[in-house]
Image (cartoon, helix red, strand yellow):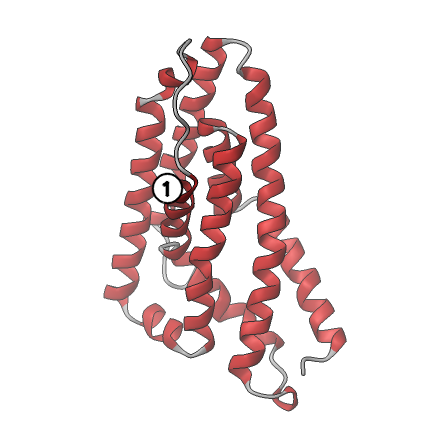
Amino acid sequence: MIPVDTLLAFMLASLILIVIPGSSVLFAIGRSLALGRRAGVLSVVGNTLGTVPVVVAVAFGVGAIVTSSVVAFTIIKLAGAAYLVWLGVQAIRHRHAHVQTAPLAPASSLKLVREGFIVGFTNPKTIAFFLAVLPQFVSPAAGAPWAQMLLLGGVFLTIAIISDSAWAYAAGTARAWFARSPRRLSTLSGVGGGLLIGLGGTLAFTAPSS
């Protein structure tokens, strides 16, 4: 079993890393600004679920193979970046749809979670991050390393989903205020789409060592 002091240290380090706005936070904010609170929070849920297979892969050593293979890393990197850019372009293209007088049918929860899952699963920084951080908190005397890394990964994801959901909710709340003006809402949806495109472009240039 992981020592309590080690677990607390990991939780503190995770909190610091998660609270500082990174790719997951920008994704949550961009989705909320473009589509609203519900879409933002559900995207966060999907993003977190997409990270679960990454944690499992790292715990059992598959992550090391991916990050050591330039081809595998590049494929994952470009796929995730392209998908983010596509989501951003869609948000910009349909930004005026959110200000129509007739209510539109909201996107299904499954679709929003699925889109978030793809983003989380294809984020190249996620594998590199867990490979770099999780082993640092593994104690040889605390049992199987893979079990410890699974536990630590679960703790990290729990903190992440709470923090990212808070960011998404806050951004969605700000969007609700902008919704009082059709022009402001249209502009804000475009900004959200621009954030997603910018994030996709950033991930496209991510190096395996970052």
Instruction: Count all numbered tags in the image, as a single digit.
Output: 1
Residue farthest toward the right in the current orientation of the protein = 5
Give the percent coordinates (x, y) of residue 46: 45, 49
The x and y percentages for residue 114 are 38, 47
Q: Is residue 98 visible?
A: yes
Relative vertical location of residue 87 with respect to residue 92 in this rendering, above or below: below
The picture places residue 135, in percent across and down from the top left corner, at: 55, 76
Q: Quadrant of the image for the N terminus?
A: bottom right
Question: Along the horizontal axis of the image, is 197 left or right of 178?
Answer: left
Position of residue 195 measured from the top left corner of the image (x, y, whole percent)? 43, 33
Residue drawn at 53 percent across, 40 percent down: 41
* Residue at the image position 41 percent from the left and 72 percent from the top: 57
Foreground of the two, 164 or 10 = 164
Name the residue nearer the viewer: 111 or 84. 111
Which residue of the protein is positioned furthest toward the bottom in this rendering? 141
| Vertical relation: 111 (above or below) 152 | above
Q: Residue at x 47, y 76 (%)?
A: 59
| Amino acid bearing label 1 | Lys
Residue 103's place in the image compared with 172, above or below, is above
Q: Residue at x 63, y 60 (%)?
A: 14
Q: Is residue 31 left or right of residue 136?
A: left
Disc 1 residue crowd, few under 14, some 14–19, many 20+, Cα 10 Å: some
Task: Check the image and report above or below for 144 versus 42.
Answer: below
The residue to which callout 1 is attached is 111
- Let me know if residue 135 appears in the view: no
Q: Quadrant of the C terminus?
A: bottom left
Q: Secondary structure at mark 1?
A: helix
